[in-house]
Amino acid sequence: MYDVLIVGGGPAGLTAALYALRAGKTAMIIEKSAFGGQITWSPKVENFPTIESISGTELADRLMEQVMNQGAEMELDEVTEIELDGSVKRVKTEFGGEFEAKTVIIATGAKPRMLGVEREEELVGAGVCFCAVCDGAFYKGRPVAVNGGGNSALQDAMLLSDTCSRVYLIHRRDSFRGEAKLVEALKAKNNVEFVLDSHITALHGDGELTGITVTDKDGNERDIAVDGLFVAVGHAPDNGIFAHLFDLDEGGYAASDESCLTKTPGVFVAGDCRRKSVRQLTTAVADGSAAALAACSYIDSL
Ligand code: NAP
């Protein structure tokens, strides 16, 4: 039986493992797609204290190495069920794994939100993308659009402007939620055009995206020819299968107290899947440490 079983191998989950292991507990991390989580999509992280600038993948690699050096066990698999048997948590996975743990920390993050425009799902992978770091290279020398007004959209537009012929940055308001410094840097690029107060209202193309229609706040429509559309309108949690363990708010985020404890003894949540006001790398790692230390105290009290 593991002391701490962590669901999700992003910064929150990996930090939880680091703290649990350093407190002398055993820890298993189960991640369904890629260790490192969302941060691996960031071309540059420049707001993590003590590190001036680092790529998201390098930051994730360093964190993983640090955690592995402490003796973490890691599985690439999807958790499908968590059952309670008294104080024991039984965790089942898609590939038939069954694990027992004294505590569970759920750090499953959030998945990219979609725009909800007709044909969006059909064109995913055929022009509609959610990760400029992963897919940007396919659009070298070609026109693309980025939709969103947060740091993800601004960073995506910045990265794409280095290689794409033209980048249309589409945002539903006339000002951005993301950092002013990034907005200024984008304004200085001669191949970036801001399309503000506008929504994407149609996607065009037969099998592959060839263009979008954008509608502004006065109802004026404009067709823009693009080969790629990078949707960066935030993320939503995917906590549904854990709804028996904790309360969810209207956005689907998990309720917990300051120590990341849910209403179920021994079950904690950490990172972007948790209800809180600021979702940043710094707050994800803070949650990971708080959840792990609270889990250790809970184990010691058993
Ligand atoms: P975000 O900050 O929540 O921004 C989402 C953007 O999408 C907002 O501008 C929002 O518009 C817009 N939006 C939402 N739904 C929309 C819809 N249906 N149609 C059109 N636009 C829509 O999300 P994010 O940029 O992914 O960032 C998430 C968190 O990670 C943030 O806290 C961010 O600062 C952080 N982050 C940090 C780094 C880093 O380098 N450390 C990198 C990326 C992200 P409104 O403004 O009108 O609501």
Image (tube, rainbow, N blue to C red):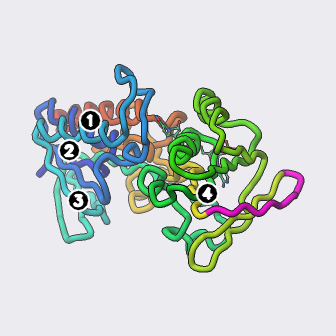
Q: Is residue 224 left or right of residue 162?
A: right
Sequence-earlier tag: 4 or 3: 3
Badge 4 amino acid: Pro
Secondary structure of residue under mark 2: strand
The residue that label 1 is drawn on is 292
Contact (Cβ within 8 Å) of mark 1 with mark 3: no
Badge 2 amino acid: Val
Camera-near label (2 vs 4) is 4
Camera-near label (1 vs 4) is 4
Badge 1 amino acid: Ala
Percent across and percent down for residue 103 are 23, 46
Q: Is residue 197 left or right of residue 66?
A: right
Q: Residue reaching furthest bottom?
A: 206
Q: Residue 218, labelled with which disc?
A: none
Camera-near label (3 vs 2) is 3
Camera-near label (1 vs 3) is 3
Q: CA distance from mark 4 to mark 3?
A: 36 Å
Q: CA distance from mark 1 to mark 3?
A: 21 Å
Q: Is mark 4 within 8 Å of ligand 1?
A: no
Answer whether residue 219 is visible to the viewer in this image: yes
The residue that label 4 is drawn on is 143
Span highlighted in magenta in the image: 217-226
Q: Is residue 220 left or right of residue 131?
A: right
Residue beneath the point at 63% across and 37% down: 189
The residue that label 2 is drawn on is 4
Percent across and percent down for residue 247 are 47, 50
**Neighbourhood count class around disc 2 (C-alpha, 10 Å): few under 14, some 14–19, many 20 upward:** many
